[in-house]
Image (tube, helix red, strand yellow):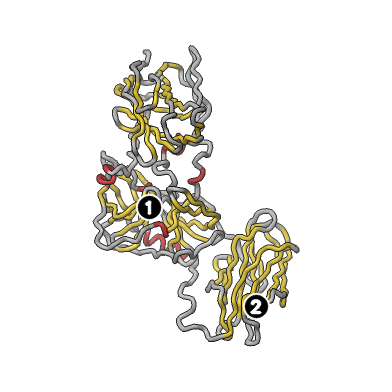
Amino acid sequence: MLVHATQAKIEFSGMRLSPIRIRVVALLISLIAALAPPLSAQTGGGVAAGEPRFRVVRSVSGSRGSEQGGRFVVDDPRTIFYVPADTQVIVYFEWDGPLGPHHFEGYWRDPERKAVIISDFKYEAKQKRFGGYWSLNLTPTITPGLWSLEAHVDGELAGSHTFQIIVAAKPAGEGPVRHVLAPSEIYKRASAASVFIHKVNSKGFPAPAGSGFFIADNVVLTAFQTVDGATSLRVVLPGGRRIDTDRVLDWSRWGDWALLRVEAQAPGTLERAPADSWAVGDRCYSLGTPTEGNHVIIDENIVGTSNFPEAGQRISLSYSAASTGAPVLNEYGEVIALAGGNIYPGMTGRSQYEVAPAGTLSLQTGLATPITLVRDLKPGVPGRTLAELAKMLQFVPLLMEQQNLVYGMITSRVDTKKNEFPASNKHQFEFRKGQDAVALLLVWGPREKVKGSIALEVYDLNNAVVGHSAAGKLNLNRGESSTQVFRLDPSPLKLRIYRVAVLQDSNPMWRGYFRLVQ
C-alpha cells in the first residue's frame, strides 16, 4: 500500500517547509548505530604515570606528606611557612612525559634567585603520568623571603614552584583545618549522601535519569537535566527507600543544576569546597553507576576549564563515566562541581545520537558545573512544582515511547532521484546562513499500523517556538518501510542553535538540533 501525506501548503512562521514526501521501499539500512599511578614516597622520590616531553600537571607545597593509595599526598598544602614552627618544605610535582628512565634535579633558589641547593634522583616512569618531590630543611638561619624550587627532568626545565618563608611566630589559629582523605573514605562519604533519581512520565512509568546528593536535610542537589521534562521524580535513598517529589526549590537550565525538596532526613551530607580552591591538574573523585542501584568511585583529574556565553564556566574532567548529577569531590571530600555540565539545555539523552553521531556534541563529554555556580538556598523558599516549571517553558518535553521510527537525520542534502529511496549519508549540525539548505530525513520501519498526524516545530534553546508546520497525515502499515523529507528555509532565523521536534498526534517523538552560522 502506498503511504501518502497531505500535499497542502505548509506554513512555518516565516520559514518555508516543503510538503511531506513519503515513499514505500524495501528497507535495507546499515545502522551506525582511572586509576592513579603508584608513587614512591621517599625524599627526592619518584612516582609513576604521562605523555611525550614534560608538561606540568600540577605542583603543590606543604610541611608534611605521606603515601596514600600508591600516590604521594601533601597533607597540608600551602605556600607560606614559618620558622621555627615549620621544620621543612616539601614540593611535589606531577608531569605528563615519556616513559622510561629519567634524571630529576631540583634547584632550590633563594630570594636572590641563587641556586643554593641542588638535589637529584633517578626514576623509571612506567606509566603515562609520573611525579616527584623534594624536601628542604628549614633552619633558624635560613634567609626569609620568596623561594622557589626549579624542577629539571633530563636536563630540561620542567616547572617552577614558588613559596614564602617567614622567620616569625606562626599566627594563632593558622594551620591545616582540612585533611586529605583516602579514596575509600571519600567513597564512603559520597555514597552515604548520594541518591538515584528517576524521571516519572505522565503515565507513571519511572526511567533512570541520574544521581544527586544531600546538601542538607530535605534538600538534594542534582543536574537540571535529571529533572528536565519530568512529571514527577522518584528519589531512591541509600538503603533503597523511595520518595516521590515534584518540587524544585531553585534551578538553572543553563547552569545545569537543580535543588530538590525531598522529605527525608539526610543520611549524609556533602560540603562545598572553598571558592577558587581547585586548579587544572588537581586530582578529584566522582561516582559512576555501572548498574542500577550501585555506585563505583571514579578517580580522575581536572584537565581544563571552559567558559560559555550563556552556560557559564565548566570544568573538564579526564573521564566521562560519572553519573549525571553526581558530586565531583576534591581530595578533602568537598564538592567542587556537579557532573553533567550540559551547555545546551535539552541536548542530552536520546537526542544526542540523533543529532550528532560524528562528535559535534563532544563539548559535553566530561564536563561538570562548578559548585560556585549553584546559588545558596535561602531559608523558607517554597520553590516550584514540576508542572509550574513546564508552564514557565523551563522544560524540554520527554519524548514519547515509540518503536516505528528507525532514525532521523538533520542534513543539508537528501538524494531524491526518481524511483530511488530518498537517502543521505551525512548527519550535519552546523549550517551556513544563506548557503546551506536544512533538511530533515525520517526513516520509518513500522512494527505496527500507525495512523494519525505528524508535524514539525522549531524552538530556540530558551524553548520559544520560532516555527511550526501544519499537521500532515501519517498512515503507516506494519512492515512497510518509508521515508519522509522535510525541507525548511532558515533565512529568517538568527545565528544560534535551534531544536527541531517531530510531533506525532501533537506528542514529541523525535528531536534534533542544528546551529546556524554566518
Toward which corner of the image does residue 207 lie, by quadrant?
top left
Q: Residue at x 49, y 56 (%)?
A: 298
Identity of the amino acid at label 1?
Trp
The location of residue 280, given as percent across then percent down, is: 55, 59
Image vertical order of residue 451 relative to residue 372, above or below: above
Q: Find disc 2 in the rendering and name its residue.
A: 136
Residue 506 visible in the shown view? yes
Compare marks 2 and 1 and give the one earlier in the sequence: 2
The location of residue 5, given as percent across then percent down, is: 35, 17
Q: Residue at x 33, y 55 (%)?
A: 259
Left or right: 137, with 494 as reference point: right
CA distance for labels 2 and 1: 45 Å
Identity of the amino acid at label 2?
Leu
Q: Find disc 1 in the rendering and name its residue.
A: 257
Label 1 neighbour load within 10 Å: few <14, some 14-19, many 20+: many
Residue 442 visible in the shown view? no
Total labels: the figure holds 2
The location of residue 184, given as percent across then percent down, is: 47, 64
Image quarter in which the N terminus is found? top left
Q: Residue at x 54, y 73 (%)?
A: 78
Left or right: 456, with 124 as reference point: left
Secondary structure at badge 1 equals strand
The location of residue 244, given as percent across then percent down, is: 26, 51
Secondary structure at badge 2 equals strand
Q: Residue at x 46, y 48 (%)?
A: 309
Residue 439: mark = none
Toward which corner of the image does residue 191 lie, by quadrant?
bottom left
Foreground residue among 96 and 167: 167
Foreground residue among 429 and 496: 496
Image vertical order of residue 155 relative to residue 451, above or below: below
